[in-house]
């Protein structure tokens, strides 16, 4: 070996293109060739140890002049769950966090929090679904499965350690339930009459029945969102929307427009919610559920069957009435857009938001076409 003192460093030539370099107290290995030079620290002050490490390790030409990064450690299911929870709490509504994250956490615990993400298979998901089926409705199990699938797809898209189609082919319990019967017009009118003594709740319930908005959407609507008979449903710092399809503008009925304009006219700050709390903040949907229940209690201390409704029943009523035949009928695509559903969720609208009995109302249509020239064909006289 050849040792040469150069300024404040020592260079030790091992062979052609490979040498040790001492800078300060630390030793580095250098490899030169093809016009490139690579230098990497050997993390030692001992020249003999530096020589041993330099001979054992190779420094490829063309790489960065520093120690190549170590491969990232295997990501466990528990660590991925922590990152997903942090992301979900930041980007989703609090009500969604309360429903989704406990379900995802149960799945991760059943598979094993210490499991390598690359080991998650369809069998893990299937066993978990089979376990959830015991004692739960098909709708609940399918909803829980959708939350777990969203988690695994989130991990697959961001970490690349889970197959995107890991949930494909999982057998789920068949859902043969039908939507509950929607409140009748008479029941809704009876409830609104009962709420007349409570101006806030009465106006709130009437607008829900007239627009079919989600209860949380109406709670977050501000005075500045109202323009004549148009109401814009927009996200802001005090209220996030359920999905991108929830952002929309709807045409109000005269009744709904009158109620909202009267309330906005009394507002000091129109940037506040129209149905705000006394402090000017957004009401929690759960609080409104309790308020409605207390307002409908009779003298005996219970809610009569004829008045039992929830804020979401007004949306159910709106969809059923406007999907049924008659002068109030709306095309299902227009109805879906009006209530803030995605274009592809028409089946969901007809399956869960409309009362099938309501859809059967109305006059029947001809199955063989209208008679020509206004003449009614008598089938008994050989008209067919």
Image: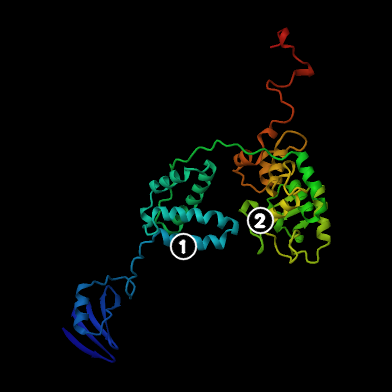
- Determine contact: label 1, label 2, CB under 8 Å: no
Is 278 on the left or on the right of 343, as rendered?
A: right
Q: Position of residue 354 (x, y in %)?
A: 66, 39
Residue situated furthest top in the rendering: 381
Is 41 on the left or on the right of 81, as rendered?
A: left
At label 1, counting other C-alpha atoms closer than 10 Å, the crowd grade (few under 14, some 14-19, many 20 or more) is few
Which of discs 1 and 2 lies nearer the camera? The answer is: 2
**Which quarter of the picture shows residue 65?**
bottom left
In which quadrant is the N terminus drawn? bottom left
Q: Element type at marker 2?
A: helix
Query: Which residue is pictured at 24% across the width and 71% down the height?
Result: 58
Compared to residue 330, the image places residue 49 above or below, namely below
Residue situated furthest left in the rendering: 1
In which quadrant is the C terminus drawn? top right
Chain-order first, disc 1 or disc 2: 1
Q: Which residue is identified by label 1?
A: 82
- What colour scheme governs how the chains and residues are painted in the rendered image of this protein? rainbow
At label 2, counting other C-alpha atoms closer than 10 Å, the crowd grade (few under 14, some 14-19, many 20 or more) is few
Compared to residue 343, the image places residue 84 above or below, namely below
Q: Is residue 88 visible?
A: yes
Residue situated furthest bottom in the rendering: 7
Q: Position of residue 160 (x, y in %)?
A: 41, 57
Between 101 and 222, the one lying in front of the other is 101
Compared to residue 54, the image places residue 193 above or below, namely above
**Which quarter of the picture shows residue 273?**
bottom right
Q: Which mark is residue 286?
A: 2
């Amino acid at each position: 070996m050849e040792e040469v003192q150069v300024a404040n460093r020592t260079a030790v030539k091992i062979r052609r293109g490979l040498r040790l370099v001492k800078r300060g107290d630390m030793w580095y290995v250098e490899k030169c060739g093809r016009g490139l030079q690579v230098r990497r620290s050997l993390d030692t002050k001992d020249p003999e140890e530096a020589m041993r490490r330099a001979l054992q390790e190779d420094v490829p030409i063309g790489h960065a002049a520093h120690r190549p990064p170590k491969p990232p450690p295997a990501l466990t299911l528990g660590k991925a769950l922590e990152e997903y929870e942090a992301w979900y709490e930041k980007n989703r509504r609090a009500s969604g966090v309360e429903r989704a994250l406990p379900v995802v956490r149960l799945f991760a615990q059943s598979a094993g929090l210490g499991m390598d993400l690359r080991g998650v298979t369809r069998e893990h998901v299937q066993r978990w679904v089979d376990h959830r089926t015991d004692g739960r409705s098909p709708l609940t199990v399918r909803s829980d499965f959708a939350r777990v699938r969203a988690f695994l797809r989130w991990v697959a898209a961001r970490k690349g350690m889970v197959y995107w189609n890991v949930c494909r082919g999982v057998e789920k319990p068949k859902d043969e339930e039908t939507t509950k019967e929607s409140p009748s017009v008479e029941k809704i009118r009876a409830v609104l009459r009962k709420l007349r003594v409570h101006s806030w709740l009465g106006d709130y319930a009437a607008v829900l029945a007239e627009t079919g908005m989600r209860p949380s959407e109406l709670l977050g609507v501000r005075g500045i969102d109202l323009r004549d008979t148009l109401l814009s449903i927009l996200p802001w710092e005090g209220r996030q929307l359920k999905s991108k399809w929830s952002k929309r503008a709807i045409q109000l009925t005269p009744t709904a427009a009158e109620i909202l304009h009267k309330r906005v006219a009394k507002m000091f700050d129109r940037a506040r919610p129209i149905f705000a709390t006394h402090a000017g903040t957004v009401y929690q949907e759960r609080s409104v559920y309790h308020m409605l229940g207390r307002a409908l209690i009779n003298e005996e201390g219970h809610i009569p069957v004829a008045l039992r409704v929830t804020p979401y029943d007004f949306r159910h009523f709106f969809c059923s009435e406007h999907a049924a035949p008659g002068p109030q009928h709306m095309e299902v695509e227009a109805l879906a857009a009006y209530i803030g559903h995605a274009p592809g969720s028409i089946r969901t609208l007809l399956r869960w938001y409309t009362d099938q009995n309501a859809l059967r109302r109305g006059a029947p249509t001809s199955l063989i076409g209208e008679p020509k020239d206004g003449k009614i064909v008598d089938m008994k006289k050989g008209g067919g």
